């Protein structure tokens, strides 16, 4: 069973994998960069903090005389040179003196540091003061004449600022990398799959009947063999279809000579019909009918094989549409009073092949006659740039499911055991469809417009230049 | 009745059956199985109508048609494979008067033959001589002259010309001409008219490309310019 993943399509999958890989890689790189940068920056600050702290501690110890009062202590603190973000804090006896009590005072010193310093250790630890990370170092000034501790806090907010700026840049870079990877993946997949796209296009064109379409041989050796075998397949398909089409055409051609003999000979018999016994006359009647049917079948087969072989060509001429349809109806031995034209048709002229269009009308009328139980109406109208011819009958109509296949060759409708809508040869309606298609028109069958029982066959023909081609 | 018909057809069975059917209609039938035979037979004893199958071994139907046309204006009917091929136009240009497709009913064939054997309609113009510039037509004598020189037309070309001349200046649609000259209805093949008009022009026009007498009326048909 195909998973959802496989249903995504190769191209989407490759793009996704590239994007995912790009994302993963950039996250790892970003995290590593961030960690190292942070470590580096902190180490640097540690060193700075410790150096400043040590020198300041010594300064304080040296300046803190036994008789130094609070004022002197303030002065000492003020005189200390501290790096940016560093704040000193001095305890002398129980009095704490700092430079900026809002940033750093006793409360900022962790208890653990206090106790470490109390135990005569010099110590430093990282903590946060009012949410700001800082390194706090402390030392007992043991050589001083007073009981004093010196502390210094180095705020790391600038480090954090730097790190977060770097973080933002890294996130943006990761995002860009991911997009780039996705684009690269899509491009690479597209490149890799472009022969598949070509194959798809060519196969679609073959399926649409363009049998001489071929793949261009790609430069890539891997794909060249695929293209070669694909083209080989297309060639044999084309050959085969052409052979079949030519076969049908040749068979019909070959049938014409014996048919000619049959038709001439049966005519001789017809001339002597009266001198025949009744049984002979009966047989002759059958022979006549079937020779006629056979002739029609061969004619239709030949006609339709011309479409298959591709030699069917239109001999268009300007036709006065209403007049033409009336003549065609009369030619089909029906009164032209069946023809009803809407006023907008007027003396519309269409450019059409007289022989083919006459066959279209004859076949549709024959069809309506055969399966449409009597009443036929031939309607002429226009719609936009098309001339419309509709033939309505009073038969059982054509079931929805059969409205397409009715135009297939030798299709026999299934409903009610009838042979379905078709002329005798089984090719009548498909020929009609081919003729109409050759004219650039459309054909379909629908229900009667007035809601009564019956089928309505509609053909449309493009309306051409009123004068059309010259008479030559 | 009693007209002689030469049928040129290589298939013996078709030839025989067509002969039988035509004989029933009262025609006398001469058979030829090749173009060469046909020319021999025709030279020996000209027929009233010639029926030629285009697909012949050796000399093909077009050649036979041209060869006969050189020596005679006898009506010729071509039998072609298909109506919508170039064969029809090629056959008409080779000089045929009409064509039939295979298979056709013998009744159709005899109807064609009858139409071709019809005499020139005694038109309203009667035997009156008609003159249009340098063109002179005498229907009853079957004579056409251009610049006082006799022009040789086939029977069908002549009928077509007389039809146009009998009502000079009037536009004849192809359908009307098909009916009057060939006896076809609305669904006759208009190429019959077109090719015959072309043939007629090469014979009577000083410049066939720019006709002076038989002119085309675009979209409508043809007329004889008085």
Image (spheres, coloured by chain):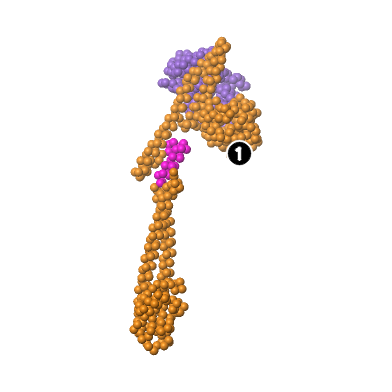
Chain colours: A orange, B purple
Which quarter of the rendering shows the C terminus of chain B?
top right
Residue placed at 42% from the left, 60% from the top? A174
Report the span colored magenta: A193-213
Q: Is residue B109 visible?
A: no
Residue holding disc 1: A383
Q: Is residue A56 above or below residue B82?
A: below
Q: Residue A111 or A12: which is nearer the viewer?
A: A111
List x then y, in percent, for residue B155: 53, 20
Q: Judging from the image, what secondary structure is the residue with disc 1 in? A: strand
User: In which image quadrant can residue A167 be found?
Assistant: bottom left
**Percent position (x, y) of residue A270?**
55, 15
Q: Nearer the viewer, residue A378 or A136?
A: A136
Q: Is residue A370 left or right of residue A165?
A: right
Q: Is residue A362 above or below residue A109?
A: above
Asked if residue A166 is among those painted magenta in the image, a careful observer would answer no
Q: Main secondary structure of the magenta part?
A: helix
Q: Chain of mark 1?
A: A
């Amino acid at each position: 069973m195909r998973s959802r993943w496989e249903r995504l399509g190769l191209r989407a999958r490759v793009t996704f994998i590239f994007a995912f890989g790009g994302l993963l890689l950039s996250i790892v790189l970003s995290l590593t960069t961030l960690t190292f940068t942070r470590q580096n920056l902190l180490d640097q600050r540690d060193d700075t903090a410790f150096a400043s702290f040590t020198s300041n501690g010594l300064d304080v110890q040296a300046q803190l005389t036994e008789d130094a009062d609070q004022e002197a202590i303030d002065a000492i603190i003020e005189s200390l040179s501290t790096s940016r973000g560093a704040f000193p804090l001095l305890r002398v006896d129980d009095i704490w003196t700092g430079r900026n009590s809002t940033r750093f005072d006793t409360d900022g010193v962790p208890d653990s540091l206090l106790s470490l310093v109390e135990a005569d250790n010099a110590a430093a630890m990282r903590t946060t003061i009012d949410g700001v990370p800082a390194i706090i170092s402390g030392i007992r000034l043991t050589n001083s004449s007073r009981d004093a501790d010196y502390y210094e806090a180095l705020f790391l907010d600038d480090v954090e600022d730097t790190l977060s700026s770097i973080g933002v840049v890294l996130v943006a870079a990761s995002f860009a990398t991911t997009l780039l990877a996705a684009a690269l993946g899509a491009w690479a997949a597209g490149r890799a799959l472009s022969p598949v796209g070509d194959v798809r296009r060519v196969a679609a064109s073959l399926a649409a009947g363009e049998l001489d379409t071929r793949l261009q041989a790609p430069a890539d050796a891997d794909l060249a063999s695929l293209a070669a075998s694909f083209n080989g397949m297309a060639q044999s398909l084309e050959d085969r279809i052409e052979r079949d089409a030519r076969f049908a055409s040749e068979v019909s051609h070959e049938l014409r000579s014996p048919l000619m003999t049959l038709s001439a000979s049966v005519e001789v018999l017809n001339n002597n019909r009266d001198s025949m016994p009744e049984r002979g006359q009966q047989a002759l009647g059958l022979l006549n009918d079937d020779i006629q049917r056979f002739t029609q079948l061969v004619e239709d087969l030949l006609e339709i094989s011309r479409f298959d072989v591709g030699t069917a060509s239109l001999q268009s001429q300007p036709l006065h549409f209403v007049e033409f349809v009336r003549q065609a109806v009369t030619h089909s031995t029906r009164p032209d009073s069946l023809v009803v034209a809407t006023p907008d048709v007027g003396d519309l002229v269409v450019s059409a092949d007289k022989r083919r269009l006459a066959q279209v009308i004859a076949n549709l009328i024959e069809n309506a006659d055969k399966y449409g139980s009597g009443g036929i109406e031939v309607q002429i109208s226009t719609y936009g740039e098309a001339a419309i011819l509709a033939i309505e009958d009073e038969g059982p109509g054509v079931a929805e499911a059969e409205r397409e296949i009715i135009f297939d060759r030798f299709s026999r409708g299934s409903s009610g055991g009838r042979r379905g809508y078709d002329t005798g040869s089984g090719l009548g309606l498909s020929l009609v469809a081919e003729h109409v298609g050759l004219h650039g028109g459309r054909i379909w069958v629908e229900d009667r417009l007035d809601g009564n029982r019956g089928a309505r066959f509609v053909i449309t023909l493009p309306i051409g230049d009123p004068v059309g081609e010259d008479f030559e | 009745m009693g007209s002689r018909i030469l049928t040129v057809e290589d298939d013996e069975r078709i030839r025989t059956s067509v002969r039988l059917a035509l004989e029933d209609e009262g025609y006398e039938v001469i058979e030829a199985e090749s173009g060469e035979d046909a020319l021999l037979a025709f030279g020996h004893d000209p027929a009233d109508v010639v029926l030629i199958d285009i697909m012949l071994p050796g000399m093909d139907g077009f050649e036979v048609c041209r060869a006969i046309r050189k020596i005679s204006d006898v009506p010729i009917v071509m039998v072609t494979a298909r109506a919508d091929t170039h064969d029809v136009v090629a056959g008409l240009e080779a000089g045929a008067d009409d064509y039939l497709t295979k298979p056709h009913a013998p009744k159709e064939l005899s109807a064609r033959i009858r139409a071709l054997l019809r005499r020139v309609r005694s038109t309203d113009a009667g035997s009156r001589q008609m003159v249009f510039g340098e063109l002179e037509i005498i229907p009853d004598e079957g004579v056409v002259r251009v610049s006082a020189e006799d022009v040789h037309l086939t029977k069908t070309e002549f009928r077509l010309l007389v039809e146009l001349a009998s009502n000079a200046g009037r536009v004849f649609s192809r359908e009307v001409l098909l009916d009057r000259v060939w006896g076809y209805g609305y669904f006759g093949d208009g190429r019959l008219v077109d090719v015959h008009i072309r043939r007629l022009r090469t014979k009577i026009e000083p410049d066939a490309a720019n006709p002076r007498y038989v002119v085309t009326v675009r979209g409508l048909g043809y007329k004889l310019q008085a």
